[in-house]
Amino acid sequence: MIASPHASISLIRSIEPLAAETDAWLVDIWGVMHNGVTPYAEAVTACQNFRHQGGLVLLLSNSPRTMEGVQAQLDQIGVPRNAYDAIVTSGDATRHLIEAFGSKGIFHLGPERDLGLYGGLNVQLVDAESAEAVVCSGLFDDTSETPTDYAELLSGLAQRTLPMVCANPDVRVERGGRIIYCAGALANAYEELGGDVSYAGKPFAPIYSMAEERLAALKGHPIARDRLLAIGDGVKTDIAGAVAADIAAVYVASAVHMERGAVLDAAQLETLFPDPAARPIAAMTELRW
């Protein structure tokens, strides 16, 4: 199902016709399955229907939390477990990068709720002044802060040439109708200061390898990439990552990339995806069966 370069992007209302051509979906969570507060009922139904007809649904998230933490969050929000088969997160991929720091003192740049990221790892968490490396999972308070609040901190870390691992490459997400900044925004700012950043999640290859391994374990054998379909609302994460991995993708419109009241049409898609070689095969206003 991989689309050739220069192909136009189909506007679709239902994912059902594509479901018949795929064995497994890689579905983004935040922006597709829920908005951080409320589940998207149509998306839940679509995933349940796909699973009912034999498909596998792997939720592929840039959350800095581990799979267990994300599953607990999904339970709390109300996304039923029968809507998916497994979860792979940026947090899971981040743990492998953290282990590479060895005995270095790590400064955790992010909220306390993400400290579970280090569970079971032999690491030493220290303050910014004592740090030899940085793991960024987000802003300390994403309800009130923006990346500009971190200019001085990031500048000081960059001057000391500390390596950074970004546990969530997303720059922004929508939470309950409000746009908030994520770790990717801080990591981008750090790179602009000359800092060295390693990214754990989408659109980078390691998380797709982890996803394929998980699907192969579930299926009992590897699934060919032309039988996979990625579904997400992140232009530079979900879609760009899938295209780079030779996986067909469907873009789901969200306020992260489109202004309120904007119409998802050919002109809007041309603006979002100007490069013909980096386009999804289809787009829809919401994941719907």
Image (cartoon, rainbow, N blue to C red):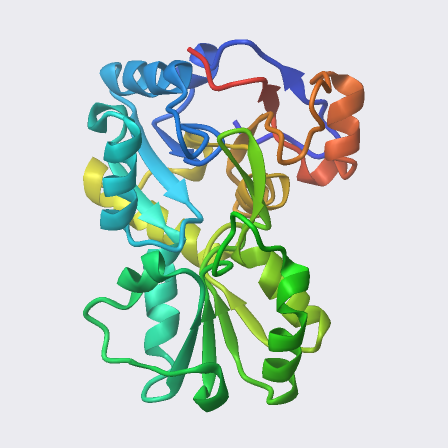
Q: Going 67% across and 65% down the picture, which residue do you hit?
A: 189
In the foreground, 142 or 40: 142
Q: Going 80% across and 21% down the picture, which residue do you hit?
A: 267
Residue 64 is left or right of residue 141, and the answer is left
Q: Going 51% across and 59% down the picture, which residue do you hit?
A: 139
Hey, which residue is sitting farthest front in the picture? 144
**Residue 123 place in picture, x, y as percent:** 28, 80
Total labels: the figure holds: 0
Q: Is residue 183 positioned above or below 39 on the image?
A: below
Residue 6 is left or right of residue 115, and the answer is right
Quadrant in which the C terminus appears? top left
**Is residue 215 among the parts visible in the rendering?**
no
**Residue 115 place in picture, x, y as percent:** 31, 64
**Residue 191 place in picture, x, y as percent:** 66, 70
Q: Is residue 121 positioned above or below 189 on the image?
A: below
In the foreground, 269 or 6: 269
Q: Is residue 71 positioned above or below 16 on the image?
A: below
In the foreground, 5 or 117: 117
The quarter of the picture where residue 119 lies is bottom left
Q: Going 62% across and 67% down the picture, which residue do you hit?
A: 150
The quarter of the picture where residue 90 lies is bottom left
**Is residue 256 among the parts visible in the rendering?**
yes
In the foreground, 91 or 260: 260
**Residue 96 place in picture, x, y as percent:** 34, 68
